[in-house]
Amino acid sequence: MNCQLLKDHKERVWQIAWHPNGQILASCSSDKTIKLWQLMNDQYKLIQTLDDCHTKSIRSVSFSKDGQFLASGGFDAVVGVWMFDGSKYKLIQQLEGHESEVKGVAWSVDSNYLASCGRDKTVWIWDHDDLEFSCNCVLQAHDEDVKCIKWKDTTLYSGSYDNSLIRYTYGEDDEWDHKQFQIEHQSTIWSIDIFNKLLLTTSADCTAKLFSIQDGTIKPIQTLQGFHKEPIYSGSFSYDGLYFALGSADNKISIYKKDAIDELGYPHFALDQIFDAFEFDVNCVAFNPKNYLLAACSDDQNIKVFDLQL
């Protein structure tokens, strides 16, 4: 397995996110910076450092589907919005409203909405008009810290310290409706990823769960357990949905491959490989949107891009 090491952050790297073109990787850190890395001559080179928004750790980063916008969420309770001006990303707005740490940011597929979630138990929906972002709605459906958010088209999902998954949909009454699902995780839901009609959750209970999402329902398909001995902080589907990766506090990354379809037409995944990735916790894993490259980041300040040769 080939691996490229990306080093420049001075503290823990919390999250990484791919640009939709698959050539640029964003990383965010406790050092209060976002770094952008671009593939040049088969090597990832640092092309920009964004350091003019946050005063505390940056916990989350997300590109819009068209790559025009980049969002960040920090422990300073601020959401940053950056826009590409043709040569680099520039800060265009700092969104305030969360009462404490922002834990996640995510763009809707059409880029019309930006969602953020935080320790204050809320999910905020932001929209924009002529590049001016404002609060569309504040959703207070969780009982505890909201750890993660993920869009499926114009439907939003959130996971929380209260062990639950919540789905938000925009109703005919111009209000965001929600439905809560108790999905049998025994501890915090740390991440959500979605591919077509499959939803993947990871948890502090050392398991990952796979669900079918269609016709307004969430149906459990498979529980992955026994491979990691510590909380699983992150999960990511490959671009074609044939694989997904998990990253854990046990310093390991595991890869699962679709190997069967059951009698109801639901896929089943089996362990393909598991390996030591870092010297400390794996905080985030992210498959490239164009190929089988897998990016990951850790408490040890490093980022790695693995060519899994799947």
Image: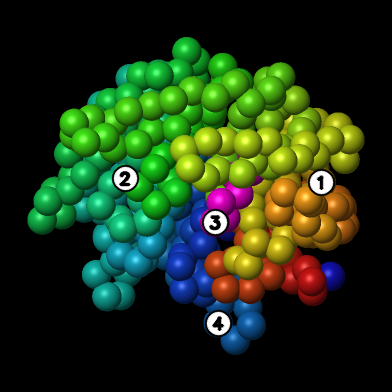
* Mark 1 crowd level (few <14, some 14–19, many ≥20, 10 Å Cα): many
* Residue located beneath label 3 in the image: 196
- Taking the image as shown, residue 156 lies to the left or right of residue 207, namely left
Q: Which mark is residue 252?
A: 1
Badge nearest the viewer, 3 or 2: 3
Q: CA distance from mark 3 to mark 1?
A: 27 Å
Badge nearest the viewer, 3 or 4: 3
Mark 1 and mark 3 in contact (Cβ < 8 Å)? Answer: no
Is residue 201 covered in magenta?
yes
Q: Position of residue 56 (x, y in %)?
A: 42, 33
* Residue located beneath label 2 in the image: 114
Amino acid on which the number 3 mark rests in the picture: Asn
Amino acid on which the number 2 mark rests in the picture: Leu
Amino acid on which the number 4 mark rests in the picture: Met
Q: Residue at x 54, y 56 (%)?
A: 196
**First in sequence: mark 4 vs mark 1:** 4
Foreground residue among 9 and 116:
116
The magenta stretch is 195-202
Mark 1 and mark 4 in contact (Cβ < 8 Å)? Answer: no
* Residue located beneath label 4 in the image: 40
Mark 4 and mark 3 in contact (Cβ < 8 Å)? Answer: no
Mark 4 and mark 2 in contact (Cβ < 8 Å)? Answer: no
Q: Is residue 34 above or below residue 240?
A: above
Q: Position of residue 288 (x, y in %)?
A: 59, 66
* Mark 3 crowd level (few <14, some 14–19, many ≥20, 10 Å Cα): few
Badge nearest the viewer, 4 or 1: 1
* Mark 4 crowd level (few <14, some 14–19, many ≥20, 10 Å Cα): few
Badge nearest the viewer, 3 or 1: 3
Quarter containing the C terminus: bottom right
